[in-house]
Amino acid sequence: MKITIEDVAEKLMAANKLLITAHVNPDGDAIGSTLALAALLHGKGKTTVVMLDDKLPKNLSFLPGYDAIVRPEEGEKADAEMLVILDTSLDRIGEVAKAAEGLPVLNIDHHISNDGKADFLYNDDRAATAEIIFELVERLGGGFTPEIAMPLYTGLATDTGFFKFSNTRPETMRAAARLLEAGVRPERVSEALEEKPESVVRGQAAALQTMELSYDGRVAGLYLDKALATSLDTTEGFIDFVRVIEGVEIAVLLKEMDENFCRASVRSKGLDVSKLAMKFGGGGHLRAAGFPVKKPLAEAKKDVLEALGEILG
Amino acid sequence: MKITIEDVAEKLMAANKLLITAHVNPDGDAIGSTLALAALLHGKGKTTVVMLDDKLPKNLSFLPGYDAIVRPEEGEKADAEMLVILDTSLDRIGEVAKAAEGLPVLNIDHHISNDGKADFLYNDDRAATAEIIFELVERLGGGFTPEIAMPLYTGLATDTGFFKFSNTRPETMRAAARLLEAGVRPERVSEALEEKPESVVRGQAAALQTMELSYDGRVAGLYLDKALATSLDTTEGFIDFVRVIEGVEIAVLLKEMDENFCRASVRSKGLDVSKLAMKFGGGGHLRAAGFPVKKPLAEAKKDVLEALGEILG
């Protein structure tokens, strides 16, 4: 059932013991939103537990409340009156669903892709779930303590790429301004969010060695063979290194995952790459797509570049 | 003579023909502030010329008014009643000083290092000069047209590293919010600011190959020999690639500029590196310093690492 933000505030205040969760593979918005909501409710005299079914990213350990986050244990039943799911739907909270079996579910999410299956759902198209929690703090009062302000700022900064993405709205910036006033230091949050293991930076260096420009510099690609691709923990953000090159309209990251199997990621600065992804049996948006290519790297590269040539016209 | 922002508004309104300039090697704040001020004054019926004594960064060409920026010509005398210098002092505007000889100088700058030699100076410790121009637009009225809003947003974003640096204040974020309301698209500005020539990305790739960690990962360095260092147009931002590594407390970029001559840049996440710079005859701040080392690369590296060892304790 869809409810209003007034209803959300009322339901939160009516409960005394709340279990708060978010999606697996939690990011700054998932963790920031759960910690801020827990701190808000704690300030109202409630008992709260934040439970996430995943390892937590180490670089968010500066957030107050991080150490109190628990993982569900085998057969555990949560002692709570209500499950609050943030930043995702019921289907992406892992084993927390089992620990919370039978509890009424209140779901707060900014993703319009939310599956709508919660008992009570507040779903609004904002930059981040943290923006919704920010509004709840304003409605319920109690002020932006450091335990609330830092996680909320981290949530906003994460989902907007530090206020760079197109989802950044005036209200997002004004919320961030209010949080700076509460004492958040933006350089601390950005330093934490930017942190990477040495292995990832070494991976970036190796991947950059494979850079090739095509079509008079309109396409820039990174082409990782199986040895390199399978040695990397992550390639997140790698495509951005070549996307930023002057004159590049489309950036490609091609990874050979196995014999005869590659994965492609494509980013464009304007041209529609969604059809390309569909052609190869993948999916995506106008400017960002991903798809598989069931060939070895050299052949996959040839196919992808050929298809990109058609888009470039 | 130091004046108030009310005085600045008055002086601008009293003149009819204004020559507007900023520092050589102009960045997003210098160009953004001059273009926004010119658009504001133009809207008030004034005649304005923006003159900068340098090549303009290509990636800022999306800014309205960019194409109308002129360079001073040999022996040229500007037809204006007043020279307005933004984002620097009189000593860093190059040949514009000659073209404007004899004109009264109004100086608006956010750098507290301003030399104070202008006839009229408004000097305030803000995140960017664009923040001061923003206030002038609000005071003088006329609204945030695209010709004013885009350059101002670009100025704010440039000098705060897209709202990441410690100089970002609540007022900075609120000004940015107002500019988004006026129609600025943050993803367009960020894409433009991030743009780099292919050669710079290739330089990054080559520099990253030299990465070395020392002192159990507390120091990360890039060590560029003469062949590499002298082949690069810029190394701006290179140090950030290793600064972000988990556990790194100090990042170093060492460049061999000539036989027996290296330049070092050092960034710390908290430890004081200013004394190190002084020891080598350079300068800097607590967390960012630069200095020369009059030795070949291998020896310079040894000396710098030894000195860093003392700081790490």
Image: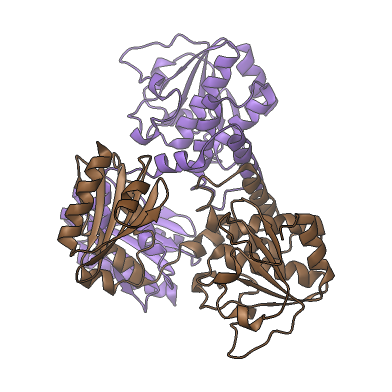
Chain colours: A purple, B brown
Residue drawn at x 35%, y 21% is A71
Q: Identify the residue at the far bottom of this view.
A: B75
Rendered location of residue A305, percent (x, y): 32, 70
Question: In the displayed structure, does residue A137 sit left or right of residue A103?
Answer: right
Residue drawn at x 41%, y 42% is A191
- Where B233 sits versus A234, above or below? below
Question: In the displayed structure, does residue A31 sit left or right of residue B60?
Answer: left
Q: Which sits in the foreground, A60 or A18?
A: A60
Say if residue A250 shows up in the picture. Answer: yes
Give the tally of numbered discs: 0
Q: Which sits in the foreground, A250 or B91?
A: B91
- Where B255 sits versus A197, above or below? below
Residue drawn at x 22%, y 57% is A206
Question: In the displayed structure, does residue A58 sit left or right of residue B162?
Answer: left
Q: Which sits in the foreground, B196 or B309?
A: B309
Rendered location of residue A102, percent (x, y): 47, 13
- Where A308 sits versus A163, above or below? below
Rendered location of residue A96, percent (x, y): 40, 21
Quarter occupied by residue B108: bottom right
Rendered location of residue B2, percent (x, y): 71, 57
Q: Which sits in the foreground, B181 or B131?
A: B131
Say if residue A281 shows up in the picture. Answer: no
Residue drawn at x 47%, y 27% is A90
